[in-house]
Amino acid sequence: MQILIISPWSNDWDIERVVGGPKIAVLIKGFAESGIKVHLLIPAQNGFKSSNVPNLFIHPIPILSFPQLKLVAPIMRVIAYLSLNLSFILYGLKLAKQYNFNLIYGLSSFLGLATYWLGKRLSKPTILKLLGIITLYPFKKYSPLHWLIYFDEIIAYKLPVDKLIVVDDGTQGDKAAAYFNVPQNRFVFEPHIVDKRLALVSNYPDKLKAKLGFKTDDYIILFNARLGPLKRLSTTLKAMKLVLEVEPRAKLLIVGDGPTRNKDEKLAKKLGIYEDIKFAGSIKYIDMWQYYRIADVFLSTNTYSNLCLPTVEAMISGVPVVTLDIRDTHKLIKTGITGLLIGTCHSVSLHQEIAGAICLLLRDASLRNKIIDNSRKYILSNVPDWTDGIEFELKLIKSVIK
């Protein structure tokens, strides 16, 4: 069996080198190790040209980049979308002359059109997977601008692919499917998967704490996310200033990089707390367990959902979570039981609520231990392991290829 996977990401497929989440790397490696010949079509960036994983073949292609112009951002997204899909269609058809693909598997709503047209042109079944959505932002009524900004997700839901997989990351992809009338036999609402070996890690990486410049008795608040506007690090920094007024041993460890990092660092300096913060940058995923092990509190302030993989990983690693009550976050985080849920992203006192929750966990060891124990048990019982997720998708692939 041979499948063509098309992905707009070029730095997220190799489990050994990946920075950020392993969502794609684990999946692709699992397919290849099961005996499927996987052809991965990705943008030619970061020098990825080949793989040591058996049955995995990398096909990098040149992609045009477009300037980020704020005044015409929605129009530029449309142009970028059309250009990207056209490139993947042309190169996909070229590859199809050399290999007999049994399935076209698209990753991201931004490649929905290419996934569908490649499947139609080659008369092959198609699967399109979305790692989460933004479409159902809680406006009471959608505006034309909203539809324009998120057109790629709307198109993805409307395209008649054989299977549309949406990861249940709390962004309510199932409600979007109902809203756009996606037939039930085509829609798959897939739970997050997590590496359950994290629950078995017992050693404490004391050298890491010293390497990062922290003292042994410092309290570490961990923030792990791509640094962009939707992650709301600025709110976290304002909250941290209040935390430090109560607990001077508290330190904020920020893992991740992104477009707002310079702005966030300037804000930290302006608030006078820069010396109590460590911007660690992007970390290889295989090293991330060490950062969970030195953390005392995990903080997630995403605008659209906080059921992201780092939250799940923190819970199974024994780190109590403080997060926002956004969309379906409450399905995983129960206040006082599996974490602390606070406010919404629209609350004017949000940073005060965050600071209060962090300080409560730092002061109350009994509550902290209760949350740690409940969280780990819940994830072990209710969230699939990596191997379970791969097996589920392999069965799904076989059901589509007839």
Image (tube, rainbow, N blue to C red):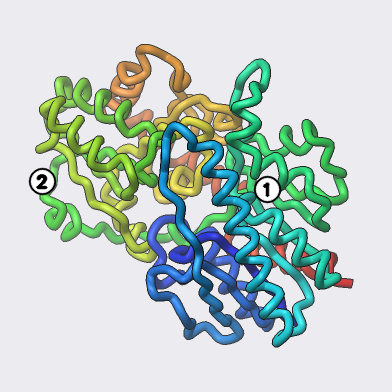
Kind of residue at disc 2 = Lys
Q: Distance between the residues labelled 1 and 2?
A: 42 Å
What residue is shown at x 53% (from left), y 58% (from top)? Answer: 23
Asked whether, in this view, residue 241 is left or right of residue 32, the answer is left
Residue 215's label in the rendered image is 2
Between discs 1 and 2, the one toward the N terminus? 1
Asked whether 84 or 278 is in front, the reply is: 84
Asked whether 94 or 99 is in front, the reply is: 94
Asked whether 34 or 183 is in front, the reply is: 183
Residue 382's label in the rendered image is none
Kind of residue at disc 1 = Val
Q: Residue furthest top?
A: 348
Task: Tell me the crowding category of disc 2: few under 14, some 14 to 19, or many 20 or more residues within 10 angstroms, Cα based.
Answer: some
What residue is shown at x 19% (from left), y 24% (from top)? Answer: 241
Choose top left, top right, bottom left or bottom right for residue 97: bottom right
The residue identified by callout 1 is 166
Which dot, 1 or 2, sits closer to the camera? 1
Task: Tell me the crowding category of disc 1: few under 14, some 14 to 19, or many 20 or more residues within 10 angstroms, Cα based.
Answer: many
